[in-house]
Amino acid sequence: MSKTFFAKVKSVLSGDTLVLINPNNPKAERILSLAFVDAPRLKKEGDEPFAFQSREYLRESAVGKQVQCTVLYTVPSGRDFGAVLLSRDGPSIPEEAVKAGWLKVREDAGRKEESEEILQRLDNLRSLESQAKSEGKGLWSGSGGVIQVQNDLGGPDFLNEWKGKTVDGIVERVLSGDRLLVRLLLSDKKHAQVMTLIAGIRTPSTERTIQSTGQVQPAEEYGNEARAFVEERMLQRRVKVDVVGASSQGQLVASIIHPIGNRNIAEFLLQEGLARCNDFHSTMLGEKMAALRAAEKSAQGKKLRLHQHHVAKGDASQSDMIVSKVISADTVIVRNKAGTVEKRINFSSIRGPRTNEPSEAPYRDEAKEFLRKKTIAKPVKVTVDGHKPASDGFEARDVATVTEKGKNIGLLLVEEGYATVIRHRKDDTDRAPNYDELLAAQEKAKEEKKGIWSGKPPKIKQFVDVSESLQKAKMQLAGLQRQKKVPGIVDFVKSGSRFTVLVPREGIKLTLVLAGIRAPRAPRNTGEGGEPFGQEALDLANRRCSQRDCELDVHDLDKVGGFIGDLYINRESFAKMLVEEGLASVHTYSAEKSGNASELLPAEKRAKEARKGVWKDWDPSQDEEVEEAAASAASAKETESPEAYENKPKDYRDVVITDMDGNGRLKLQEIGQGTAALTTLMNEFKKFHLDSKNAKPLGGAPKAGDVVAAKYSADGQWYRGRIRSNDRTAKVAEVVFIDYGNAEKIAWADLRPLDQPQFSTQKLKAQAVDASLSFVQLPTAPEYFQEAQEFIASRTGDRELVASFDYVDSKENVSYITLYDYNSQGGKPGPSDSINKAVIASGHGMVPKKLKAWERSGQHAAYLKHLREVEAQAKEDRLGMWEYGDITED
């Protein structure tokens, strides 16, 4: 007996089979095959002729409609066969499909059937089939019903042909809210049935069975709802497919447009809170991504489904700031115009070149310099997009969009290939408002092979530190003095009047000391030490000079390789700026020597009268006292003359030369009680450090000036040393061995505390004394200087000598000496047979043109005359530094 029921057609599997659902319970599905007929089959390995056309006839007629179904019989497997009435008054299926020629009546249909009603129905079907045959309809039209079906994209040729185009398609299956099986109708004879990702969105996963284990993986929240939403609207509907690209797994990425209303299904899913925007598709969609972002924002505002816990961001705060420092290619420090507020800002959604990425690291300096030129000291608008809490060793920080004259700085960095775009977590709302524009700019930079995408490292600019030693500084001095207003960049501010400056066109960096002024000393990082207003001077220098383009005039050198000169920021003297703010005082003699006294002294006078900075307690009477003291000092200086050194008694001492540094300065030990005590101390010192119980490491990072025990690399022994400088990054310190004078860079691991009283400098003072050869000036050219070093070492090394201490300069802590070798093969030397003379005679040194006051005393006149004669002979013989003639001639 036939059964009749009402159902909704969910889909059509073939020309003779429908999938039905209960209108009141969409999850209840059943399959109904049309009775007494057959249709060609759709197969993965290749459709039978006219299979698609047959299925299409039934799909277009029935899908999405509510129909009346009658089950005529059921086979033992449980499948129902019957007929479908498309509306109350018809038409009826399969009759209409047979009439149209898309179904065949089975030959064995009705053989065992006795029902007159069914037999009559079969006669009608066969009559309709005969009519379709005679008219050549559908399956009976002859050849040409074969359609070639491609089940994958088949390589890049597909995208090359179809990317950016719109293709008709049919949604065959809905696997999840964002993943469909779509049949693309490329032409009448060729289709492609491919897995397709809906462009621009990602929906939660649906429930699925893991094939390898058979376990059921539950759906994510709203995953099944998203799939049902798409199925109801798109399954087996004819759609427009806008091809935009392919995923990394080779799946088609496309926008699916429903023909009714011409709307993108992705927008509907986003508006209902059933999907989130997919950043990975942004560059494929371009401007079309904006509509999807707006739809997602609408759902977030209503807190729909996936966004039920969404916390709306407040209105972005915008402020006018000035960039005071560039930390890296994605981080700057900004301050308000009043200078009262300063904070660290990270650019939203971008990241500068990373040190741990080989392709990016070489571009760090270039990217930072690009950002410095664009922003330093310039007014910018800062719009805070979010706040990142402290985590994984990073401080809490604001992320913001920074614009300068309307130009988005983050976008400029990405466009030039100096930054990459961060892939945010799906719930991360602290992102740039122009995020899609950033992604598009990154893709363009990749295509144009800019910056880090070029595939080749940049030519790294190396800066030679010419202030590393006095010798290097002297070699560079003349060239810089000849130039006026040398362009540079202030790389680091050491104090209010001391800077590290890069000079790109010379490829050097140098320490610049402001001429004619003295700024108060700033406190150390710990806040200790320093002088009043030292920190204020340092702060002003940082605000006005740090990382700025500058110009410098070089006048002279100081004792340690610093260049004395003027620094100009925006064509204004910074020394004058410091003095005007009362954060530096004028050193009159130096200012007059440098030629800037005319602007510094009036500036100082104005600062005094305004009681600024160091002059806050200024008393005009103080200046009168200072002037009187200066006059007395000048008078004393005038009385100082070479005659003051006449009849000075000779001071001879036995010495050993232990080292010679890069500036030509000797290190010596006096033989006597000190050296005997040192021998005893060193024997005990070595025994102490051989004992493993005493292998105590330093308690923390060493500081400049600390006295430590240091392991010398040449012999592996431990010696007393003093920290000269420290590299905290490499954990290496430069150590001067205080008993021998030589220096070496030593790892912190090879340093130990020197806190034992028996080895302290109170027990035995440092034995190495700085000395310089009297009446001898060593060559400045590196090759001749090295030869001079080697010559002096050959005449002084590993032997006891006699030194005449001609003059001891207590200010510079250096003794000027004449050396004699009493153990030479020539026997006892005469008064003029010194090592000093041998240096000049061999062309490894010269008599200074400008003599010190003590050198001009009468007691040295005869000796000086003799040395000049020796020098003249060396010049004539073209020895050493004179091999190409007299270098002192113009």
Image (spheres, rainbow, N blue to C red):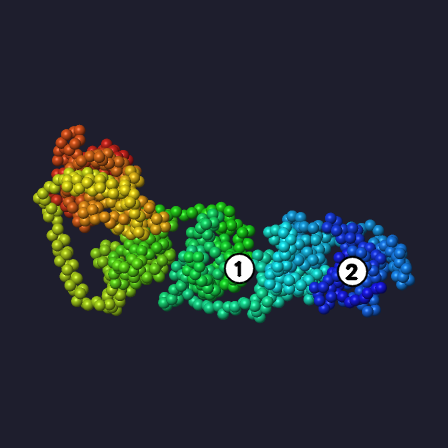
Which label belongs to residue 32? Answer: 2
Residue 793: x %, y % from top left: 24, 36
Mark in the foreground, 1 or 2: 2
Q: Is residue 190 at least partly visible in the picture?
A: yes
Query: Badge 2 local density, few (<14 within 10 Å), some, or many (20+)?
Result: many
Q: Are marks 1 and 2 in contact (CB under 8 Å)?
A: no
Q: Residue furthest left?
A: 647
- Which residue is tagged 1? 425
The answer to whether residue 485 is visible is no
Front residue of 680 and 783: 680
Q: Nearer the viewer, residue 464 or 528?
A: 528
Residue at position x 48%, y 65% in the image: 385
Q: Is residue 534 left or right of residue 41?
A: left
Asked if residue 579 is positioned above or below residue 759 in the image, the reply reads below
Please state, as top left, top right, bottom left or bottom right, where the C terminus lies in the image.
top left
In this rendering, the answer to whether 207 lies above or below 875 is below
- Name the residue located 23 percent from the left edge and 45 percent from the top edge: 738
Which amino acid does the dot numbered 2 rest on?
A: Leu
Crowding near the residue tagged with mark 1, few <14, some 14–19, many ≥20 C-alpha atoms within 10 Å: few
Element marked by disc 1: loop
Picture residue at 81% right of the left edge, 62% below the top: 71
In 3D space, how far apart are the residues under numbered discs 1 and 2 (Cα atoms)? 46 Å
Measuring from the top left, give residue 173's x and y in whole percent: 69, 58
The residue at 64%/62% (across/down) is 224
The dot on residue 402 is none
The answer to which of 183 and 749 lies nearer the viewer is 749
Q: For the residue labelled by badge 2, is the local secondary structure a helix, a strand or a loop?
A: strand
Tag 1: amino acid? Arg
497, 46: nearer the viewer:
46
